[in-house]
Image (cartoon, helix red, strand yellow):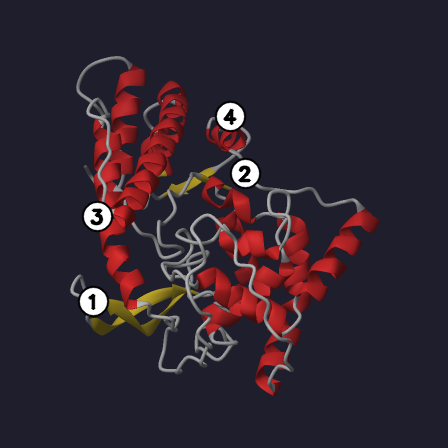
Amino acid sequence: MNCSGPVLASAGSVQEWAYRDAEQAVISGHLVSEEDVRRNGEKYTSAFLTAFAEVSQSYEQFYRQGVNDGLHGQSQLPNNSSSVATIAYQRGYDRGMKLRTTFDNKNSQPTVPGDVPAQPVPDPGATPEEGKADDQEYEPQTPTPDQAKFISRIAKSAQKVGMEYDLYPSVIIAQAALESNWGASDLAQKPYHNLFGVKGDFNGRSVRQPTIEYTKEGKSVKIQDFFRWYENDYQSLCDYAETLNDPLYIGVHRGQAANFREATHALLGKYATDPHYDRKLNRVIQTYQLTKYDHQAKKGLNEKQSVKALPITESTAHKSQAASLTKHRLSWLSVAGGVGSAGALGLLRRFAFK
């Protein structure tokens, strides 16, 4: 498959061509350009969008099943599975097996791009029972001057994003704090404003920074990689929120999670590989009393009644992908065939419309 676009099948109907190309795009993870999709005609484009939605949903389902089975060391893929399902499941299973080693090592320190050492995070204790949200209570403390400065820096933007995307501001602030080392990482500061260490580029802008990667053997290696460059903190938070709009993270939204603990629990095994990730977030939220921003945001939402919850369900995602190209401009497509930079399971990136 050519990296610049889909490969047309040599025979069969347009629907068959489009479906085969969609399968190849999902499996290979290559970029598919707008021009290459459009030039095959409106009928092909519509069929490709529909097929891609179906195939990517199947890929994600079996990849997640594979990760779960890999974590438990039990392969259970049905014999009559499709080629896409088989490949997705095997990739997920391999990843799950590797995560077992990660969990055993219990590496509690988050990776922070750059040379800034991570601020210590107290050991949250034993891993909670599978399927159960963390209910441990954490004693309130006064944040350090640097921590207080960071909270003040992003709190208003976090509340705004929380209302716009149906998210808990407390969770947003806590994640930004852990991922950026309370704003101390080079990426989180001006002029980059990359609060979550997201790789790649944003609107064509990126910065090259040193970061730590791990080999299959678990050895850490320092490399240079490209990270997204935002104009301000709010832009970084919105991009993060767009990531959580994926159906994979539906349980993180306030409409699904009754409290911040259920929201952080919904991030486990998806946004980060750390088995204590939810407990670390809960500790930050409760220790520094970040729930007050949740209450303020909810009050503002009730008073204005102008912001609607925006979690994308499978049905709305499907409709957006099959929407008329006369209403949307297709910009680019990327499929993560494994682990993406945004989370442990990665995201099957959808068509982005502008």
Is residue 153 visible in the rendered structure shown here? yes
Q: Residue furthest top?
A: 13
User: In this orientation, which residue lies closer to the viewer: 192 or 273?
Assistant: 273
Above or below 115: residue 169? above
Q: Which residue is mark 1?
A: 218
Q: Residues within 10 Å of mark 2 (few under 14, many from 20)?
A: some
For marks 3 and 4, give the one nearer the viewer.
3
Q: Which residue is mark 4?
A: 324
Amino acid carrying mark 1 in the image: Gly
Percent x, y of residue 326: 52, 28
Secondary structure of residue under mark 3: helix
Mark 4 and 2 residues: CB-CB less than 8 Å, in contact? Answer: no
Q: Which residue is mark 2?
A: 312
Mark 1 and 2 residues: CB-CB less than 8 Å, in contact? Answer: no
Marks 1/2: CA distance?
35 Å
User: In this orientation, which residue lies closer to the viewer: 218 or 140?
Assistant: 140
Percent x, y of residue 81: 24, 25
Amino acid carrying mark 3 in the image: Asp
Above or below 178: residue 46? above
Mark 4 and 1 residues: CB-CB less than 8 Å, in contact? Answer: no
Secondary structure of residue under mark 1: loop
Amino acid carrying mark 2 in the image: Ile
Residue pictured at 61% horizontal, 42% vertical:
310
Q: Which residue is mark 3?
A: 94
First in sequence, mark 1 or 3: give its number.
3
294 to the left or right of 67: right
Amino acid carrying mark 4 in the image: Ser
First in sequence, mark 3 or 4: give its number.
3
Above or below 257: residue 76? above
Mark 1 and 3 residues: CB-CB less than 8 Å, in contact? Answer: no
